Amino acid sequence: MVNVETSLKEAMTSIDGSVGVALVDYTSGMALGTLGGGKDLDLTVAAAGNTDVIRAKLRAMEMLGLKEEIEDVLITLGNQYHLIRLLRGKGGNGLFLYIVLDKGRSNLAMARHQLKRIEADLEL
């Protein structure tokens, strides 16, 4: 089991093409930890915005009567992938990992696999 800071560092170093990563509480919209980003990627603003994405999807699923759980949400931009992975398990309710990937330097399938592994090792 590893802490938040170590998990964010692991995501930035082990996932090819990582630009920034955050752990976000979608009940409040607050980033609990961030790493990377920059002048063109404010991770605290992105955390708040992606909170709205998750809340909207959960409402839609409820209205549709879907009893499934969201594993992850992918947003594809021209040059980036934005991957949101909802945390499950002990202490993970209401949280998601958010990672931005450079589309030209990343492998989406491997990124999803690595993020799932990082989630499993994360201790909250």
Image (tube, helix red, strand yellow):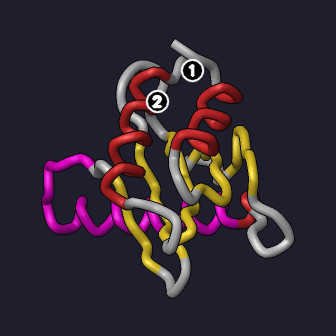
How packed is label 1: few (under 14 Cα within 10 Å), some, or many (20 or more)?
Answer: few
What amino acid does circle 2 point to?
A: Gly
Quadrant (top left, top right, bottom left, bottom right) of the C terminus: top right
Number of marks in the rendered image: 2
The image shows residue 90 at horizontal and vertical percentages of 41, 19
**Which residue occupies the foreground of this view, 58 or 107?**
107
The image shows residue 68 at horizontal and vertical percentages of 17, 49
Q: Residue furthest front?
A: 105
Q: Which residues are magenta?
A: 46-69
**Residue 20 magenta-highlighted:** no
On screen, residue 115 versus residue 98, left or right, reads left
Assess whether mark 1 and mark 2 are in contact (beta carbons under 8 angstroms): yes
User: What residue is disc 1 on?
Assistant: 124
> Could you say whether the residue bearing mark 2 is in a helix, strand or loop?
loop
**Which residue occupies the foreground of this view, 40 or 60?**
40
Q: Quadrant of residue 120?
A: top left
How packed is label 2: few (under 14 Cα within 10 Å), some, or many (20 or more)?
Answer: some
Q: Quadrant of residue 116?
A: top left
The image shows residue 61 at horizontal and vertical percentages of 24, 62
